[in-house]
Amino acid sequence: MAFFSTTIPKHRLKWVDAIVLIFVFAILYSVLNLGASMNVPFSLEEQSRIELDPSMLPYYAGRSLLRMFIAFGASLIFTLIYGYIAAKSQTAETVLIPLLDMLQSIPVLGFLSATIVAFIALFPGNLLGVELASIFAIFTGQAWNMTFSFYNSLKMIPKDLQEASNVLRMNWWQRFLKLELPFSMISLVWNSMMSFGGGWFFLAASEAISVLGQDIRLPGVGSYLATAIEAGEMQAIAYSIVTMILMITLVDQLFWRPLVVWSQKFKMELTESVDVPTSFVYNILYRSTLISLLMRILVTPLCNAIDRLLDRMALVTEKAARDLQRVSTSLIITKLIKVFLAVIILRFMYEPVYEAFMLVSSMDNSNLAEIIRLGLYTLGRVMIAVLLGALWTVPVGVWIGLNPRLAKVLQPIIQIAASFPANMMFPFITILFLKYQVNFEWGSIFLMMLGTQWYILFNVIAGTMSIPNDLHEAGAIFKLQGWQKWKTLILPSIFPYLITGIITASGGAWNASIVSEMVSWHDEQLVATGIGSFISNVTDQGDWGGIIWGITVMCVFVVLINRFLWRRLYQMAETKYHLE
């Protein structure tokens, strides 16, 4: 895969190359300086103050952006490895996918205090531990959705393409590089964009953390906002919101938009679309002589060297796997490996699991049953939130996906709306609920939707944009219009993407229930009956038995719903609604 042409244009360097050169050096200089600021001495007693001077906001924005991109890089590596193993190994799939269901349902902010203690212990006296804890929180807000997307894309690869790769005797690396990664690229880019937006929510929360009875503030826009709210500085709050909107817009135009345009080259079609997405940054990079030179002299040889290395590794590992398979026909080695892994897992898991079991077993049976009943209330809200989200995102997503020019205009707006931390809107909505006496049992569904409906919208847009132009032309030849076009072409084409979006939105809704079933404004508090408000309550009280049982019940609900509802729909998408 080549990002850009490796042929050096004959014309000389021009003004575009000067801009690219300045931009590249500015990024490198900023990353080095901001990265050095992460590795400095730190103590809980003597922390650097967060200044509310607006001139500090560019520096804080740079620190926040660096955390976001480090977390995104880690999420992408995790996605490619975890999703690939889950899709390729049936044994691993039975463990990894339910585990992924649980991971995305566990309320990240609930155990942030525990993870930050662990990271601080890893880097005593250094700010790097706190920085890694913040990056880990952002990572957990990005990785699960991307992994689901990549896993689902690998499972949806047409059988004729898989058979062709077998006929060509591709090893696993060649198949990954030339078939699987290109096939999943459009969905991966759009879901990465959505997951990156979700990371902003955790960024705002993870830069201002309470642990060991003290507040830790990392330099960033999130901590600037938290400090401004504490100080009651409305002007500083406005500065931080404007800065966040500017960051989201710049990241969209300079990073995501070029990636969306680039990903269109992996669209499966025999004829080229008339309307294609465009990006001025992509055009500049594509026309730049400097970039072409850099690609030819540095990037391409490096990629080729890595390609050759992994190609050789693939040959060796495949041969080793075949030898192991022959040897393990008696199942002795396979059983020994499984027993060894089970012993290792039990060794490390026994003590914490036993302590958790003792805490839960000390609770009254009626309380345990009551928490299950609360889970049913939240289940109802999650289903309604997902249904209402799908009702408007499917037609709007298809409308945007079928109109690249419209997508060009609306994508930045949608990106900002989806990326803007939903919890910053909660106080304003709470005031409205209190003023108009809205029943919060139903009102909390709206709060739940604020941060989750975007997963469905982005997947529907990605699914619609990936419909081959050949099928559009075939639909025009057969004069498909209205409902007939939806029934025959659009809905079957986007169905796998829609199910992926619904699964991730459902997981996000469960996670969001922690903050959307209990909100407050001054002395007023609105509480909805559900397991989310229960977990928020017991977390505030430090009731570890209640926290563990509440999260366990939530995870069981998520896994059961995914297993008996969403997975069956996904299997339908895999067997009935995918291109061959």
Image (spheres, helix red, strand yellow):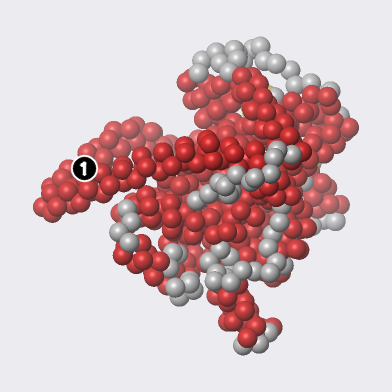
Left or right of 386 in this view: 302:
left
Q: Is residue 413 above or below residue 316?
A: below
Left or right of 329 in this view: 407:
right
Name the residue rendered at 69%, 33% in the picture.
21
- Locate the C terminus by quadrant: bottom left
| Residue 177 at x, y percent in the picture | 43, 52
| Residue 383 at x, y percent in the picture | 59, 63
Give the labeled residue for mark 1.
Answer: 337
Name the residue rendered at 36%, 62% in the picture.
165
Name the residue rendered at 75%, 63% in the picture.
405
Q: Quadrant of residue 236?
A: top right
| Residue 31 at x, y percent in the picture | 64, 27
Left or right of 54 in this view: 258:
left
Looking at the image, which is closer to me, 55 or 515? 55
Whether residue 180 appears in this view of the structure is yes
Q: Is residue 306 above or below residue 393?
A: above
Farthest residue, direction right: 235
Count residues near mark 1 (Cα–Cα under 10 Å), then give few for <14, some for 14-19, many for 20+.
Answer: few
Q: Is residue 245 above or below residue 439?
A: above
Left or right of 450 in this view: 89:
left
